[in-house]
Structures are given as C-alpha cells and as structure tokens.
Image (tube, rainbow, N blue to C red):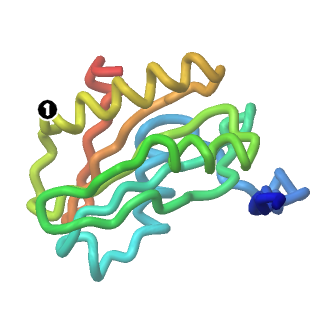
Amino acid sequence: MKSKVNDIAISYSGSTKSNLLPKVTCSQSAAEIAFSNWNMDKIGLQETFKIMLLNNANKVKGIYEVSNGGITGTLVDVRILFAVILKSLTTAVILLHNHPSGTLKPSEADKRLTQKIKKAGELLDINVLDHLILTPDGDYFSFADNGML
C-alpha cells in the first residue's frame, strides 16, 4: 500500500511597480510605515509581532503578522517567520512588536528573540536591520539606534 504525501504549494505575488513601494531610510521611516499598518484600536490591548519584508533597495514588500498574543506577550515561532521571509524572497527584514503597557524598554525575552532571529538570518543571508517596539501613544524604541543589534 502506498502512502499519500500532501502537496506543498508556495506562492508569493510581489508588486512589479517598485517605484510605488515605500522605502525605509531610518528607524523613524520604518516606525511611520509600521504605525500606518497597525490597528491602532488594538495596539493598547494585546501584543502582536510582525515582520516588515524588504527588498535589496530597502523598499517595503509587505508586512506580515507572525503572532498575536495577550496583554503581556506573544509567542513567535521562528520557523514560521523564516518560512514567510524565504517564500517572499526577502533579503532584509525589520522586526516589529508592540508593548500595550506603553513601556519602551525591551524585555530580556525581546532581546533573546532578536538575537535568535538575527543569528538564523545570518545563516540564510537575510539582514535583520532593526527591531522596533511600538507603543499606543505613538512612541517607538529601535534596537539598531540603541546599539542592541
């Protein structure tokens, strides 16, 4: 008896009009793009982790929500994160998550996750350019600007 194996489909529909894509030039421009793509009605309610997918020219290909959690945390599966990055042929990424409490200080878990993703990205030639923590009042913390990347 033969065993049946599931088919795996990989798809990505990238824009062919790269001149229309927003470009990230610094942490502030990345934060502005992130805030404009965040549900501001929920930013103070629950923690969400997203990735900003960038091409070689640092133009935003898209933003993908990796996980949605509770008030004080969310679980990030790094395998799913990299599956999305690899399927979309992304060369650089900016990590994004919010702190509903409004605190800008990264937790030890935030720091460990950032280093884990950065290390995995190095193996796959994917640049982790920054990790931004967003708050409900419109402030942000940049790991790169603070020498933590």
At numbered mark 1, what does the secondary structure look like: helix, strand or loop?
A: helix
* Horizontal side, residue 57 vs residue 15: left or right: left
Seen at 65% across and 50% down, the residue is 60
Q: Position of residue 94 (x, y in %)?
A: 49, 40
The quadrant in which the N terminus is found is bottom right
Seen at 50% across and 29% down, the residue is 128
- Name above or below for residue 37 compared with residue 102: below
- Choose between 57 and 12: the one closer to the eye: 12
Seen at 36% across and 49% down, the residue is 76
Q: Is residue 104 visible?
A: yes
Q: Quadrant of residue 117?
A: top left
Q: Position of residue 34 (x, y in %)?
A: 45, 57
Q: Is residue 11 visible?
A: no
Identify residue for label 1. 108
Q: Position of residue 47 (x, y in %)?
A: 24, 63
- Choose between 94 and 125: the one closer to the eye: 125
Residue that protrudes farthest toward the bottom in the picture:
41
Residue that protrudes farthest toward the front in the picture:
1
The quadrant in which the C terminus is found is top left
Q: Position of residue 46 (x, y in %)?
A: 21, 70
- Name above or below for residue 95 compared with residue 39: above
- Name above or below for residue 71 compared with residue 14: below
Q: Quadrant of residue 49?
A: bottom left
* Horizontal side, residue 64 vs residue 57: left or right: left
**Residues packed near mark 1 inside 10 Å, few (<14), some (14 to 19) or many (20 plus):** few
Seen at 25% across and 28% down, the residue is 112
What's under tag 1, amino acid-wise? Glu
